Image (cartoon, rainbow, N blue to C red):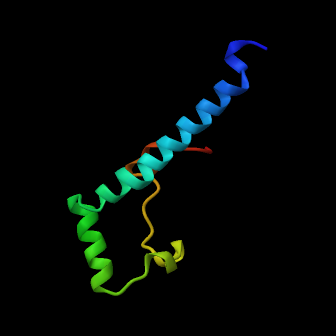
Amino acid sequence: MSPLHSPSRAVVRLVAGGMLIAAVWCGLFPRLLEVGPVKRHVALMEERRVDPSAMYYTELERLPLRPAWVDDVLVLWP
């Protein structure tokens, strides 16, 4: 078996990937709550007593898929 595909190397990569995910989940995401726009959004949701885990995509405002000028310029089917 080549050194690039050894089981110990795979385990090391798995552990490193798990540690990276844990660092992002437990370190970066909580810090994002202190960033201005995110902090204001969370405060607004708490003020309105909205449970974000109970929100569905159909309850959110529809975001434009592309700018309006694209429809004027782009012709998909003549």
Residue nearest the viewer, comparing 76 with 15: 15
Q: Residue at x 33, y 79 (%)?
A: 45
Residue nearest the viewer, comparing 43 with 4: 4
Q: Quadrant of the C terminus?
A: top right
Residue 22 image point, x, y percent:
47, 49
Q: Residue furthest top?
A: 2
Residue nearest the viewer, comparing 62 with 44: 44
Quadrant of the rendered image containing residue 60: bottom left
Q: Residue furthest right?
A: 1
Q: Residue furthest front?
A: 8
Q: How many marks?
A: 0
Residue 70 placement, left or right of 40: right
Residue 2 image point, x, y percent:
74, 12
Classify 62 as above or below 46: above
Residue 26 placement, left or right of 54: left
Q: Residue furthest left?
A: 36
Residue 25 in view, yes or no: yes
Residue 18 placement, left or right of 11: left
Q: Residue at x 44, y 43 (%)?
A: 73
Residue 61 image point, x, y percent:
42, 72
Classify 27 as above or below 13: below
Classify 31 as above or below 76: below
Residue 48 image point, x, y percent:
31, 86
Quadrant of the rendered image containing residue 36: bottom left
Q: Residue at x 50, y 42 (%)?
A: 19
